[in-house]
Amino acid sequence: RRCILADGCVLALAAAAAAAAALGAPQVVRLVLVLAAACLVPGCALLTRLPVADVLEGVALAVALGFCVEALGALAMVWTGWWHPFVWGITVTAFACAMLIADLRRNLTGMSGLR
């Protein structure tokens, strides 16, 4: 149940960040939501494939993995000279949300099979 709640919260964060960016929310709100989503969403998507024993460990790993994914994308953009961070952010978020939805679906079907 903890995985289902975590997946749902991270997907809600991604949706809130996208809505804040698209609708032109105040700058502080948009900054906080987009920064939190950029740090957590890619890392949480990768964390669905790793075993985590503690909640604090999971949050720390999610942030660290999120930073690694973002740094990898920035490095690739610098090396290729194709500097489009907005496109990179949308691509990473789309793939991460797809992974989170697949994990959420797997966890929900696993719970329904237990009843």
Image (tube, rainbow, N blue to C red):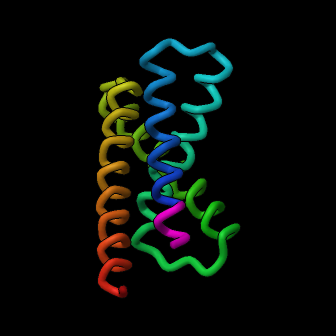
Q: Observer-nearest residue: 99 or 112?
A: 112
Across and down, in percent, residue 24 comes to 50, 12
Q: Observer-nearest residue: 63 or 101?
A: 101
Q: Is residue 112 left or right of residue 32?
A: left
Residue at horizontal 43 percent and vertical 68 percent from the top: 48
Q: Which residues are magenta?
A: 1-5
Residue at horizontal 45 percent and vertical 25 percent from the top: 19
Which secondary structure type mostly characterizes the magenta part of the structure?
helix
Quadrant of residue 92 within the rendered picture: top left
Residue 37 falls inside the magenta stretch: no
Q: How many marks?
A: 0
Across and down, in percent, residue 86 comes to 39, 25
| Image: 99 above or below 15 | below
Q: What is the residue that sits farthest to the bottom in this orientation?
A: 114
Residue at horizontal 33 percent and vertical 28 percent from the top: 87
Q: Observer-nearest residue: 53 or 92?
A: 53
Quadrant of residue 55 within the rendered picture: bottom right
| Image: 63 above or below 27 | below
Across and down, in percent, residue 28 comes to 68, 20
Across and down, in percent, residue 90 comes to 35, 33
